[in-house]
Image (spheres, rainbow, N blue to C red):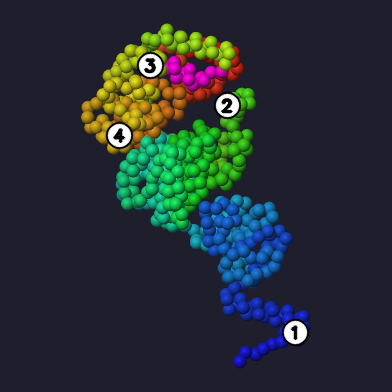
Amino acid sequence: MVASLDISELSVQELSDLARECVERLHSMLDTVIYKPSGTGYITWAKIVTGVDPRKLNGFCALGTPIPVFKASLVPKDAVILECDYMKELAIFRAVGDEKKEPLGTAKGWLKAQKILRAALYGNYVYNEPEVEDPQTQEAHQRAAFAKLAALDYGALFMRMGSGKTKVALDLCAHKLENCGADLVLYICPCAILDDFERERKRWRPDMEVAAYGVESLTQSDRVYLKILRLLEGKRAVCVVDESLTIKNWNKKRTPRVQEIGRQSTFRYILNGTPISRGARDLYNQILFLSPQILDMEWREFSHNYIIWDGEEGRRYIKGYKNLEHLTGLIAPYSYECDLVLDVRKSYEILRYDNDFDSEYRKIKEEILARMEYSDIDFWELCTRLQVCYTKSAGRPEAVNAALESRPGKALVFVKYLDGIPEGAARITGSETRKQRDETLADFRENDEKALWLTYGTGAKGLNLQFCSHVIFADQTFDYAQKIHAEHRIFRTGQAADELHFTDILCKCGMEEIFVRNIEKKGGLLAEINRNLRGKEASIKWVKSL
């Protein structure tokens, strides 16, 4: 029989002693300890943490049970406690005894707090680099990239085109699957390189299942977007965005969709061949995809801190960048950057041809100048009309043929307009199916055909064509970055030639002189327009110079 006690007859002191004895008895039976907050009045909330949700970057990432902050509480012995004060500074402790806490770390942001919590709850991860049977299959820069990003839940590979960043991404995905509890790999890239990615996957990770989607599909198909979101439900996914410049603009439908996919993924990586210093403006949305806590600023603040603007309101353009060392410092802990260094010589030449349509060319200029007297004009339309005019000259195909005959080996010929491709020539223009494109590439590799003709939009990215040693730019592109991408179709890891050749085919006219200047300055037509079209008089002077 359990004895009963009438507590109404006890004094205040006796009740206090009885309560303390009951608490001590209870927590000795339950293996609990007394926890007292660090500074009553300063701590706004506290929680016993039992797990971490890395998809969240606020207090909800710490899974567990809230506890009072104005009085002592019973907590399990060795429990991990998270405290947040009124300054939003975070402190993590382990409850080791009655009113005894072992400090585990402090943080001002949730990224660092998550790392401390994971280490306290699960112990430090052991990152084992995948074994490589043949040391020649993984270059030193690939090993360095893997070693740095394997320890992170998100990161950027700013590795030059041709340096093998796809293999590093596959190794990172395999590592997360094997060691970090990931159970899904999602790969997003331009549709044009889906087949090339699949070949790389079969080469390096044939047993790894990957859900690969073209980034253009996220713009064109609500069904594909919703399918991906359903696929992510309840998963610890690794999401890789290849050619992450495709998500640089918020006004593109795909950008907010990829951002949401990133928020639903546990691990996130981006692949980009453009160095940090060459595309500072384009970095914002890419880094935001990885984590908003890396930069911890809105676009307006980012623009003010790192971009030098010029021009009038409504017609501003980027004059340059500033504070890049600071920006690089913010991103560097979460990124790996390297250039492509190959023991290969590169030679450049220019071949010119006469403008057979000089009268038509001048007529277009006069028409535009007349319109400028009373209205604004579309300079892109002007430049396109002029270029279409003179590229019909008979000297252009002759110059291309001369370039082809001047060098041994196979060549790639890049064009802007389909009319510039000879009848019956091997071509990749974007109108082919994947099967047709693969067959074209296979035939070109094996047969005696000298040249493969490609459009910039389709052929400048993603294709591995190291068996060629000559690139001819039959038409000039307004976007200098496209030329760099085109060069890297042959200047990449695996190139066996001792010397690579690059030939620009230019017409003898004012328009092409702009391209010559920008080739020397390594800039595009957009930069040329921004420099010169300031006011009506300057614009007229520029058009007359074409």
Check whether the beta carbons of the residues at disc 1 and disc 3 lie within 8 A of each other. no
**Residue that numbered label 3 is attached to:** 391
How far apart are the two marked residues, 1 and 4, measured between alpha carbons? 91 Å
Above-or-below relation of 205 to 98: above
Image: magenta residue range: 376-387
**Residue that numbered label 2 is attached to:** 317
Above-or-below relation of 528 to 136: above
Q: Which residue type does callout 3 highlight?
A: Thr
Which label's residue is closer to the chain start, 1 or 3?
Answer: 1
Q: Which residue type does callout 1 highlight?
A: Ser
Which label's residue is closer to the chain start, 4 or 3?
Answer: 3
Q: Residues within 10 Å of mark 4 (few under 14, many from 20)?
A: some
Q: Residue 204: percent from the left, percent from the top?
A: 33, 46
Q: Residue 378: percent from the left, percent from the top?
A: 52, 20
How far apart are the two marked residues, 4 and 3, measured between alpha carbons? 26 Å
**Residue that numbered label 4 is attached to:** 437
Q: Which mark is residue 8?
A: 1
* Residue drawn at point x = 45 percent, y = 19 percent: 384
How far apart are the two marked residues, 2 and 1, measured between alpha carbons? 82 Å
Residue nearer the viewer, 258 or 178: 258
Picture quadrant where residue 13 is located: bottom right
Left or right: where 173 falls relative to 498: right
* Residue drawn at point x = 45 percent, y = 29 percent: 481
